Amino acid sequence: MSEKEPSERGGVSFGVIASAAVVALIVVVGAVVYFGRDSSHSSPSAAKGDGAPSTSVNANATGFAAPEVDLFGRRVDIPNNPAGQPLPQDPTKQKKSTDNDWLTAAPAGTADPHGWQRVFGASVPFSTSDGPARLEDGLAVGYSHTPQGAAIAAAQITYRLNARPADRELYVRQVRVSAQEVSLYDQALADQRLPKQQPEKVTRYLVAPDAFQIENYADDMAIVRLAARGPIVDNRQLWAAVRLIMVWDAGDWRLKPSESKVPQTDYVDSLAGWTKW
């Protein structure tokens, strides 16, 4: 099986088929995927992310380079700052709880140029209504207290963490984890079992999900599902749907690892009832 295409099923790479599962790799399925790995099975080169793109260039830059396309031929913009370029925010575009489409509307701007940006190799959404409003220490923060803000934060945090598993600042500040989980994470860092940056052969599969769904919403918690395009089976398009729990904490959305033993990723053959970005 060549590195160029890990596997082909129905004309779609197996890496893309599994993209939603990759998104869930660390913080949804559980950190044991990395933390529980015997250190003898990893190497310093793996921890350093050999073959990964540099993320230290133009860290304070603004603006964009020429756009590119993802695996499905969709536009993805390339910010000069590898951490992304937040867009000007217009709070008047935010949905209100009294709106009929409060739970089903798409955030403004994600379908426009610069709405999806390649950040540390992964495609993540930027809106003009619901955040992220700014960067702080390379982290995207400032999401609206709305279903749309929760959906954007879910995609941003999970994709960023899977692109850069050793980003401790991201893990500690934007994931709701216990002291014990932080201790396990720090041990994994010390043992060099977490890549600083995933190589392009991994991040190229962290492509924009086609749609999201707000399964449940309250002021303190939102259950968000992201649907990433998968294989065509028996002439039917499938999507890998991952369920993410977001909590409102200290004025922003954070990701809460699921404690459920039930798999949080399944497959759907229709996006009826989903919101397309």
Image (cartoon, rainbow, N blue to C red):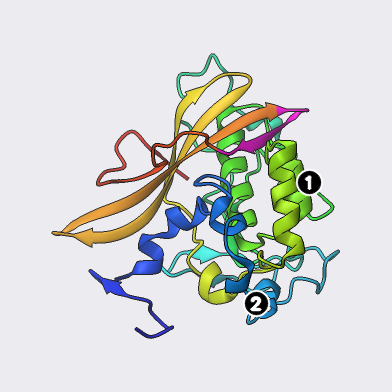
Which mark is first along the chain, 2 or 1? 2
Residue annotated with mark 2: 43
Residue annotated with mark 1: 134
Q: Which residues are magenta?
A: 249-257
Q: Main secondary structure of the magenta part?
A: strand
| Contact (Cβ within 8 Å) of mark 1 with mark 2 | no
Q: Quadrant of residue 51?
A: bottom right
- Describe residue 190's horizontal placement relative to residue 27 as left or right: right
Instruction: For residue 227, say whether it is visible.
Output: yes
Q: 13 or 92: nearer the eye?
A: 13
- Describe residue 36's horizontal placement relative to residue 14 as left or right: right
At label 2, the amino acid type is Ser
From the top left corner, tell me how far across and down residue 54 is, in percent: 73, 76
Q: Residue furthest left?
A: 234
At label 1, the amino acid type is Arg
Q: Residue at x 56, y 52 (%)?
A: 32
Q: 263 or 100: nearer the eye?
A: 263
Q: Residue at x 58, y 62 (%)?
A: 122
